[in-house]
Amino acid sequence: MNSEPTKKPNPKRPREDEDEEQGQVEKIVVVSKNKKAKMKLSDEEDLPIPPKKGNNTTKDKNSQKDTDNLTEEQDNPKKAKVKKESKASQSDLSQSTPSTQSSQRKPRKPISTAPKKRTKPQLTSTLNLLKQVEDVSQENLSKIFKNYSFVGCVSDGLALIQNQTELYLMDVLKLSKELFYQEALHNFAEFDSINLSSPAPIGTLCMIALDAPGSVWCPEDGPKESISNYVVELLVSRREMLQDYFSLTIDDEGQLLTLPQILPGYVPEIGALATFILRLSTEVDWEEEQTCFETLCREFAEFYSIAPDEENETKRYWTIEQILFPAFRRRFQVPSTAAEDGSIIRIASLDKLYKVFERC
């Protein structure tokens, strides 16, 4: 029985097959690697050049935060809205830091500690009185005081001044009354105060005036004490008006405390104070407003006008030159009656004198 011999498997063949398969796999791997390398190169050509390493981390963190915030907003819109509002408030706070505010703030103006000046009331009555002064003034005479040279004082309250080529003799006693009247109107409700060294009882001042040798009191006028009490009651009842408009202060007990400062540096003759207080009750019309202010200013002018002082002529001459005549120059309006009553007299004209000298 012929039996075909059993073929044994060739151990070498599968080895060769494995080698061939392995070679094919390696080829595939190499091809795939080459493809990947080519893809990598093409991708790198399209990519932008990476920035320097300085701000990469910060930008990456910020971009990562923005990405997280976007996803968080998509997931929870309400929470994202709250976050945005909180960030906005934080940005507002950061913008209003003290340093920014201090740089943007304007410097504050210094607070003035000076006392506020009182507003001058524009009363029709005082405006009318000033208009009357202007209407009766003489412009040519007023110009003399605008441009003059003070020559000197003469006895009995007379002074010499020169205006251009003319020499004038001034009666300072008469002119000072008009000067103080006009200044009282101009300074109405704006007076500074002269404080008395001690309170002066009005009743006592009235008794002094009534007992003076030149007093016009007579028994028919009534007892002096009654007149004194009447003056005290009258001035105390008017003390608010006297204080507001003339800085003449009287307390509740009827004592005089202050007088008005009509001209800076000028103090009236205190010896005439008693007569002045008494005349406030007899010579002032307290009923009608304009007449009241006019008569009051006239009495102040009478009291403040310069008086002859034989004991201290040097002081009086200094007051005339340094206080009164500068006030004449400022805004004094000479009344037209000054040329008629002897207040201003032209005594020489240098032009005429030169002609006389030329003849000689």
Image (cartoon, rainbow, N blue to C red):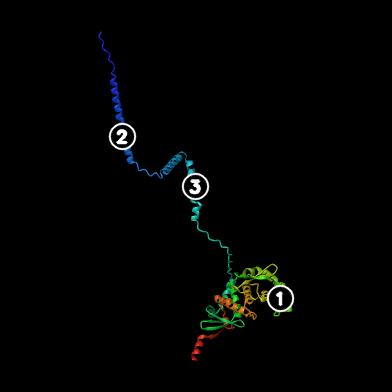
The image position of residue 142, as x and y in percent, is: 54, 79
Q: Which residue is labeled 3 in the image?
A: 90
Label 2 environment density (alpha carbons within 10 Å; few <14, some 14–19, many ≥20): few
The image quarter in which residue 278 lies = bottom right
Dot in front, 2 or 1: 2
Which of the two residues, 133 or 184, is positioned nearer the viewer here?
A: 184
- As drawn, is 1 to the left or to the right of 284? left
Count the labels in the image: 3
The amino acid pointed to by label 3 is Gln
Alpha carbon separation for disc pair 2 and 1: 134 Å
Answer above or below: position of 358 versus 257. below
The structure residue drawn at horizontal position 30% and vertical position 26%, both measured from the top left corner, is 22
Of the image marks 1 and 3, the number of the one nearer the N terminus: 3
Q: Nearer the viewer, mark 3 or mark 2?
A: 2
Q: Residue at x 51, y 87 (%)?
A: 353
Three-letter code for the amino acid on which mark 1 is drawn: Ile
Q: Is residue 226 visible?
A: yes
Tell me the tag on residue 208: 1
Residue in the image at 70% along x and 74% along y: 206
Q: Which residue is mark 2?
A: 35
> Of residues 137 and 330, which is closer to you in this image?
330
Above or below for 26 versus 246? above
Quarter of the N terminus within the rendering:
top left
